[in-house]
Amino acid sequence: MLLATTALVLTALAAQATPAPEPRYPERLSAWETRAGWTLLFDGVDARAWSTKDGEPRVDDGWLVPPKDATFEWSGTLGDFELELLHRDAAENAAALASHDPLAFVARTAIGTRLRAVARANTLELWDGTLHFDPVEVHANSRVSLGPITAWIDATTKRWHVALTSSSSAAAFRSLRAREFDALPPPKPLFDGTTLTGWRAIGDARWTVEDGALVGAVGGGRQSFLASETEFADFVLDVDLKNELPGNSGIQVRSHQNAKGAVYGNQIEIDPSARAWSGGLYDEGRRGWLADLSKDPLARAAFRPGEWNHYRIECIGPHVRTWVNGTPCVDTLDPIDASGFLAFQVHSGNDTKLRWKNAELRELGASPWAPLALAVTPPENGGAPFVTNSTGRWRAAESVDDVVLRLAWTKAPTCDYRLLVRRTLAPLRGLDWADITDAASDVGWDFAFDATTQRAQGSAPWYAVFAGSRVQITPPNGERWTTNDLRAPSTGPLELRGTPGAPGPVGELVLDARRPR
């Protein structure tokens, strides 16, 4: 097995086993998330954008902690928006409050509860995995509070103000980010409402348009798709769908077709069965399940079989996120496909019929693969790095921040090698690469690979993703090792080395990178 497993797993276990230190570096969004319109309202370090008449909020281990029973306001304003955050409180305090306040919210104590507030068309709603409160009408200059979130509209500017309320001294907030709805490009319809122009059928299902809706029904029983003639890279897709028979289906994103005509690529599941994994992420024809919903009862309850359901799918750089009827289902990283076609599936068998309507796409450009510029450090005894002597080094000529790396050996290496990534907010001072060979996650990363395993896996590439505070390694066998929300440096150089002291040819490497544009 790749030694990277050990490096990444040990890092994650160490983070869980020891108390989290005071954050040395601010929380940050990845450049892909920024491109998708998100803005941080609190970075885990600096609370000056938040104020209250009852005293200043403090920062404790990355959490924004207000005074007890205080309402504190963000200094900016927003157009119609969605707001995401983590909220925690002492369970006994929140439960007592909820007993006499119908708009109180009971948050879990340790990791917090992920909340989502939506403010649009003069209404405010609060989600905690499902819609916690029905939308409440908001009048100009009149504050409305739903749980810990308060919002109101300025009568003059017509823009929203946001505030947070602590019900006890244990209340705290983090991972605060917002997105204005008009930050995204305007949507474009995927169908003209009358024909299948721009789409091609794969398989034997019957595809028709009825009353402006696309209808896919089982034909001869083969696995079937209606695929777009255009490929898409980064996008936000909204679509309504209804199953009229109980068969499984899905929506392909960034997908492809092999030489035998079989479709492969990521699929967002439509699962009307009792398993209820609708909104999960499945890799059709390749790796299988990447993110099922087996441990997420709220997500499994979101889909309503036999009724109209709304799907939102975001594929932006390596980020893949899905929602079903407003309930978040998947938030993961998948680096393998940068672009591909969209497709609607009619699963094999004899019990599938679906309708899709209001399919709209917001395109956000592309992050194509490009060779990574490297500066060569010659081996001590001469020769070319990674060609004649493994003590040579290749080093990125510039800092590496948000990036997807793809490494493929066209000739298998004959010695072990390491990828070293140093991510820091300040220039390196007096530190050599040897200092971070086995460094902890808040200093850098060292992923080691053995040549025997690499030769056995052939020329299949492996991937390394650095996105904001998240790191993921995807080896050729398709497994994925991910660390979430590391409190770590955000940028710095990258280096690839062979094992020192092991002379001889070490293979031929192709190194590509995919970055936000």
Image: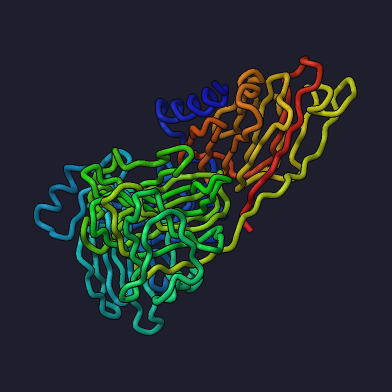
Q: Percent from the top left, x then y, of residue 481? A: 49, 33
Q: Percent from the top left, x then y, of residue 110? A: 30, 38
390, 397: nearer the viewer: 390
- Above or below, 464 against 184 in this view is above
Say whether residue 366 is left or right of residue 283: right
104, 269: nearer the viewer: 269
Check the picture and name the quadrant holding the N terminus: top right
Q: Residue at x 21, y 59 (%)?
A: 306
Q: Residue at x 48, y 36 (%)?
A: 482
* Image quarter of residue 140: bottom left
Check the picture and name the quadrant holding the C terminus: bottom right
Say whether residue 456 is left or right of residue 319: right
Residue farthest bottom in this picture: 156
* Image quarter of residue 109: top left
Q: Residue at x 43, y 74 (%)?
A: 195
372, 143: nearer the viewer: 372
